[in-house]
């Protein structure tokens, strides 16, 4: 399978790693939308977060634990965690990932 994030997990494609866990890795987004923009992904390939919840709920839990840890490391007063599911919602990489975004004031609703 030709999956960009699986290649980051395997080390075939380099990334700026932030955290490695048992079931997840976290790395800086290549096109950051805020001072902190980290992608936290399961090591196991799943197309989206709904699929991950069924196939590896422990990895889903670890995504949120990692988000809390990284937010604390960056001393974020608050942060947004986003999962885009489907192209219409803006998903462009079909390997589940949590966007951890913070370090600036964020508007609501999103675009
Ligand atoms: P999506 O649009 O699927 O929700 O998010 C995909 C994210 O992956 C985007 O924010 C994009 O900037 C990021 N991205 C795409 N290619 C790479 C890459 O090669 N390395 C890193 N670190 N991030 C990437
Ligand atoms: Zn993958």
Image (cartoon, rainbow, N blue to C red):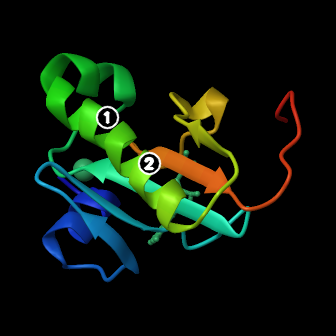
Q: Residues within 10 Å of mark 1 (few under 14, many from 20)?
A: some
- Cβ atoms at labels 1 and 2 below 8 Å apart: no
At x 57%, y 39%, the residue is: 81
Gap between marks 1 and 2, in whole Å? Answer: 20 Å
At x 83%, y 46%, the residue is: 106
Secondary structure state at the residue bearing disc 2: helix
Vertical side of 77 occupied by 64: above or below: above
**Residue 35, percent across and down?**
71, 70
At x 53%, y 56%, the residue is: 71
Vertical side of 83 occupied by 95: above or below: below
Q: Which residue is mark 2?
A: 67
Secondary structure state at the residue bearing disc 1: loop
Number of on-image labels? 2
Q: Quadrant of residue 25?
A: bottom left
Q: Quadrant of the C terminus?
A: top right
Mark yes or no: residue 95 visible: no
Observer-nearest of 13 and 19: 19
Q: Which residue is mark 1?
A: 47
Q: Earlier in the sequence, mark 1 or mark 2?
A: 1
């Amino acid at each position: 399978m030709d999956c960009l994030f699986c290649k980051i997990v395997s080390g075939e494609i380099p990334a700026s790693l932030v955290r490695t866990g048992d079931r997840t890795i976290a790395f800086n987004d290549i096109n950051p939308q805020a001072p902190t923009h980290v992608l936290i992904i399961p090591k196991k390939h799943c197309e989206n977060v709904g699929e991950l919840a069924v196939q590896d709920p422990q990895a889903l839990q670890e995504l949120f634990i990692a988000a809390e840890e990284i937010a604390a490391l960056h001393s974020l007063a608050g942060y947004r965690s986003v999962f885009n599911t489907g192209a219409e919602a803006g998903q462009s990489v079909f390997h589940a990932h949590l966007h951890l975004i913070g370090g600036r004031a964020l508007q609501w609703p999103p675009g």
